[in-house]
Amino acid sequence: MTTSTPEVRLTLPRLIGAEWLKVRTLRSSWFCLAVAPLLAAGGGALSALGFADPELTGGVSARDAVTEVLASASAGLQIAVVVLAVLVLSSEYTGGAIRVTLVAVPRRLGLTAAKAAVVTVAVTVLAGLSLTIAYAVAFPLLDRGGLTPPRYGTMQALLGAEIGYSVLVALFAFAVTLTVRNTAAGVGLTLGAVLLLRVVLFMLDPLVRFDLQSLAFAPAATRVWTDPLSSALPVVAAWLLVPAVVGAVNLVRRDA
């Protein structure tokens, strides 16, 4: 008498659960989770110091101050977000575990989608928590400067925009890593594109008499959350899709 082992269907929810388990068992993931609120709080506090003196905040609205604080907190948060998003994929390539994963999960695009979903959810929660902590740290400084908190709806909109921006940065880092398959290269290329390219294009603007800065990832990703139907949308889509498609094609056609 023989017995057969029932086949386990590799549905997307199962793949997401498996990938989430991998992320939880990475010590580097917990390091990113611990550092992210500290970086965000530090950036927000430094920005809020500029609004702590009532004599220097004349004419500054509470909305503008909170926008600046959250933007500075988000800038600090980006480092941890990028590293986390890169490690979700590159950690398996570094240790060679990707070969075992691809044997167990032949559906390579489904596997990639599961990893991207884990990155999206993890960064959404992490950014929301970190930016809330950053605002809580900055609030006493803003209050000292006589800046009352904006209305709840306004605060939610500002916080949501920065969370969304963090998610776009994380997905861009994931797409870049899908192409380069290396931790250092993924982190370096992503941070270079997000933090440095904008400055380089800004310096080249006068030479070509064209708004090159609007083609950079950071300003386009920031703008798309305030004006989704603007010209920033195709710019962000191009930044995300080009490395994602190249990486996906390589993943499907090549061995790990």
Image: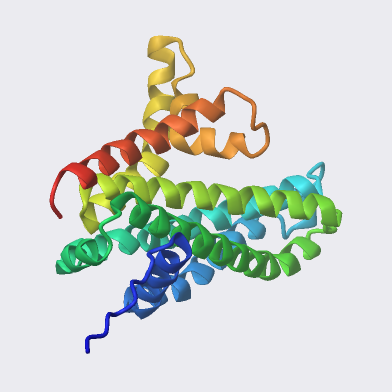
Q: Quadrant of the N terminus?
A: bottom left
**Quadrant that contains the C terminus:** bottom left
Q: Is residue 65 above or below residue 203?
A: below
Lateral position of residue 15 relative to residue 41, left or right: left
- Say how many tags the image has: 0
The quadrant holding residue 25 is bottom left
- Identity of the residue drawn at 33% across and 49% down: 109
The front one of 252 and 180 is: 252
**Of residues 234 and 160, the one drawn nearer to the viewer in this rendering:** 234
119 up-or-down from 31: above or below: above
Q: Nearer the viewer, residue 218 or 1?
A: 1
Asked if residue 21 shows in the view, the reply is: yes
Is 10 situated above or below 82? below
**Quick one: 230 or 8, which is closer to the camera?**
8
Residue drawn 13% across and 51% down? 255
Residue 20 in picture, x, y percent from top left: 42, 71
How far across and how far down the image is residue 209, in percent?
Answer: 45, 10
Q: Position of residue 37 (x, y in %)?
A: 53, 70
Name the residue rendered at 20%, 55% in the picture: 182
| Left or right of 204, for residue 160 | right
Q: Quadrant of residue 52?
A: bottom right
Side of 243 where 166 appears, left or right:
right
